[in-house]
Image (cartoon, rainbow, N blue to C red):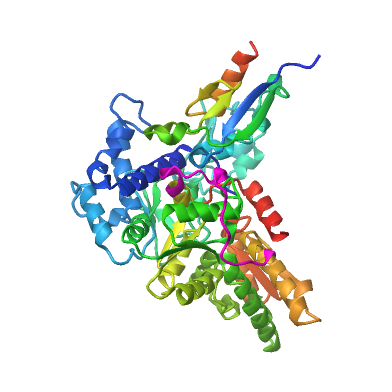
Amino acid sequence: MTKKKVKVEICVGTTCFLLGASKLQEMERFLPPDLTGRVEVQGTACLGCCRNDNFGSAPFVKVDDTDVIANATLEKVINRVRRSLNL
Amino acid sequence: MIMKVANNAERIRRELLIRIIRNFMRGTLKDVIDRIAVDMRPRKERPSRCCVYKDRAVLKYRVMAMLGFGIEDEIDEAKALSKYLKEATERQAPDDNILSVLDVACSACVESQYLVTNACRGCFARPCTFNCPRDAIQVVDGQARIDHSLCIDCGKCTKVCPYHAIIRVPIPCEEACPVNAIKKRSDGTQVINFKSCISCGKCMQACPFGAILERSQIIDVLNAIKKGKKVVAMVAPSIVGQFPGKLAQIAEAVKLVGFELMEEVAHGAQMTTEHETKEFFEHMEQGDHIMTSSCCPAYVETVKKHVPLLQPYVSDTPSPMRFTARVVKEKYGCDCVSVFIGPCVAKRKEAQRSPKVDYVLTFEELGSFFAAMNIDVASLKGIKLPRKVEGYARGFASSCGVTSAMLKESTKTVADSNLDNDAKFINGLDQKTVKQLHLYGKGKLPGNFLEVMACEGGCVGGPCVLGDVKLATRAVKASTEE
């Protein structure tokens, strides 16, 4: 049986890229062992979250097509992925 | 080597740049500039330093640097940023010195370099005490202790400890400086000696407190755009791999910012290659033992200030930036404003000596222009580039690129070239490789062509890049094959 994979979309719009997304793109390399192979990391075009004056909350990461994480860090994304997988 | 990692200092710098540019464009900067520090560090939030007030004070100095002022320019501590802004918009030319150490942010890292950690077991063998040439180590209460008044920083104890319990704590800026140009004042904070400084920007990249600031020219460029001048962006070859998106898309983004158009400095690199290849064969005919590249301004400065023996062998060929600026001023008229955009701090210094280059921006600053104006590079259609550039010229952005471009050129002009066998590289300047330069100057090392890049990896590893060095190197390589 193939295990469920969580989709993680990293916004690579210019603002997010500048404020940290360029480093998040490589997150697959830093996943804890129990999550290896269970996350599908993709880049995505600008999610539009930076259009307001709240750009300071970039980078943004979308998980499971629904949830947008602001001020995304590796730790935050991993916690959210765990929740999706009920781990 | 210093790893280029995502960090808080970098993030704050970019956030500030975006705020400043966005408000300048809206015409609101003079009203909000003195509020930025409070907006970013409200009283109820957790401070990064000892308290929000210090955070704010440091932010103020950062903004000053972004307006083009160093801490040295401060006469009245109470002077408002809006006053500095007014001066910045009225000035004609940017200041000479580029870097400055913000003493209030400098944490005055400890000078004693060796430290016994908790991993020390106070063992029976005690090799640290026996191997210390100065008897500086005693075991007290079951733990080794170093008497720093005796310690000479030889490092023997770290090597002999079976538990790796003794570590070396560096002073990051001093360790990063290839030419010992940054030193402690009596109060422990660092100061740059500009007589020795080569403007490589390594200290700025290395400081964990973000205490080394570079004076920006964003206001000068924004002002020229606002006044409706014809502002031409000259982007360094290393731009490939700095933004998600292709060159044609970046060209469109640059135009949307308000630049007249984007010229590739890779075109100038083509001219540099032709000229430098010719010059190489002249040097060889003259009987010189070696010639070295000259496109890296931090390297050229290193030779000028620290390795006089090598000076006669540095090529006289103008850098790609200079060639490009020449073309730009001819094509678009002397009154156009030429702005070099690259990953480099030292280029600012080179530009001061190149009358045809008006201003210098970094990739980080360009990225902040895009972000401030909601320009998403990757979603643009892209426009036609003003000219076709040979792929090999884009290779200047990564280490060994200059040599491979020259090899290509020499096979075109000279059938039997001896450049091939004997080209050598210095990929990144540090205290060790600067020593090697002395040996090259004396003719004690083999090789007849020496390519030197101050940054490891070449310009893609520069202090003001946005992209990951590995990914950028790959992107540059791919672009040379296009």
Residue B175 drawn in magenta: no
- Estimate the x, y position of residue B168 in percent, counting from the top left: 55, 42
Name the residue: 67% across, 67% down. Answer: B390
Q: Nearer the viewer, residue B288 or B414?
A: B414
The stretch of residues the image draws in magenta is B369-391
For residue B326, above or below residue B172? below
Task: Compare residues B290 and B351 and report the one nearer the observer.
Answer: B351
Q: Residue at x 81, y 81 (%)?
A: B416
Residue B370 screen position, x and y as percent: 46, 47
Please tell me in which quadrant of the rendered image residue B282 appears.
bottom right
Q: Position of residue B24 (x, y in %)?
A: 31, 48
Is residue B103 visible from the viewing direction of this image? no
Farthest residue toward the top? A86
B115 to the left or right of B85: right
Question: Does the segment drawn in magenta span residue B379?
Answer: yes
- B91, B140: nearer the viewer: B91
Task: Write the residue at 58% across / 61% down.
Answer: B385
Q: Is residue B445 above or below residue B10?
A: below
The spot of residue B117 in percent (x, y) is 54, 31
Task: Tell me if residue B57 can be seen.
Answer: yes
Principal SS element in the magenta part?
loop
Q: Residue furthest bottom?
A: B286
Nearest the viewer among B293 and B244 is B244
Q: Could you say which quadrant of the image residue B399 lies in?
A: bottom right
**Left or right of B311 on screen, residue B149:** left
Residue B112, compared with residue B341, is above or below; it is above
Q: Quadrant of residue B309?
A: bottom right
